[in-house]
Image: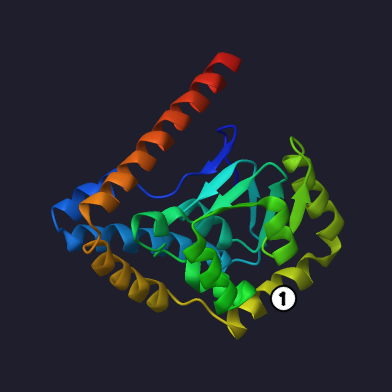
Amino acid sequence: MGSRIRGIFNLGGDLGLFAEKIRAQDELALRHYGHLCVDAIHGNSEAFQAPVVTIALVQGDALGGGFECALAFDVIVAERSAKFGLPEILFNLFPGMGAYSFLSRRIGPVQAERMITSGRMYSAEELHLMGLVDVLAEGGHGEEAVREYIRRNDRKHNALQAIYKVRRRSNPVTLIELRDIVEIWSKTALGVSDMDLRKMLRLTAAQDKRLAQSQSVAQAAE
């Protein structure tokens, strides 16, 4: 999985919708949204029950749910310019759609909590040192790095897909766990303040502006 939008892998959930439903105290809608997200992420995290190795190619920012999405893959290939972050703590919330579950299994609960509560952006190189990014690629060479990874590991495919299957079996992220965390997230969301919501909407506006600029650049290039 990759992105066709230059500089952006995935900016995460619909913060504008979150703010709207929080103001309406519509926990049911928030929970429904979260369940749809984790249902999709869980299917990917199990490689769709197929004998394949899933690869995320991150060539731009992966924020919030976008970071959670990348974590659900067997292998993460990231260009050096890619940035990763979980900004939810900045508006008094937490990433509720897989971040804790996937991070705690990769880097342990203490480091996962530090990352979640920091609210800061991490470089691809930092995450490579932590073991979260598997392949670090030079800028503009992400697709080439994916092809090289596939070529280099082609003869090991039978073993590798089995090893990732064993990893999932030995320390599984279950759909029940993900859905239970969504329940906590949706209840927590209802408790954010008006000031927190304004922070959320400022981030939404900044993301929308950046997305529009990226799309304009892409259209101009065509």
Instruction: Name the foreground residue: 64 vs 158.
Output: 64
Q: Answer left or right for 112 relative to 191.
A: right
Instruction: Name the foreground residue: 57 vs 197.
Output: 197
* Residue 165 screen position, x and y as percent: 64, 75
At 46% from the left edge and 31% from the top edge, which residue is drawn?
Answer: 211
* Residue 2 screen position, x and y as percent: 60, 44
* Residue 116 screen position, x and y as percent: 49, 64
Is residue 30 visible to us here?
A: yes
Q: Answer left or right for 100 relative to 198.
A: right
Q: Which residue lies furthest to the front in this view?
A: 195
Q: Residue flagged by tag 1: what amino acid is it?
A: Ile
Residue at the spot of label 1:
163
At 43% from the left edge and 59% from the top edge, which residue is drawn?
Answer: 40
Residue 91 figure quarter: bottom left
Instruction: Name the foreground residue: 179 vs 193.
Output: 193
Residue 184 figure quarter: bottom left
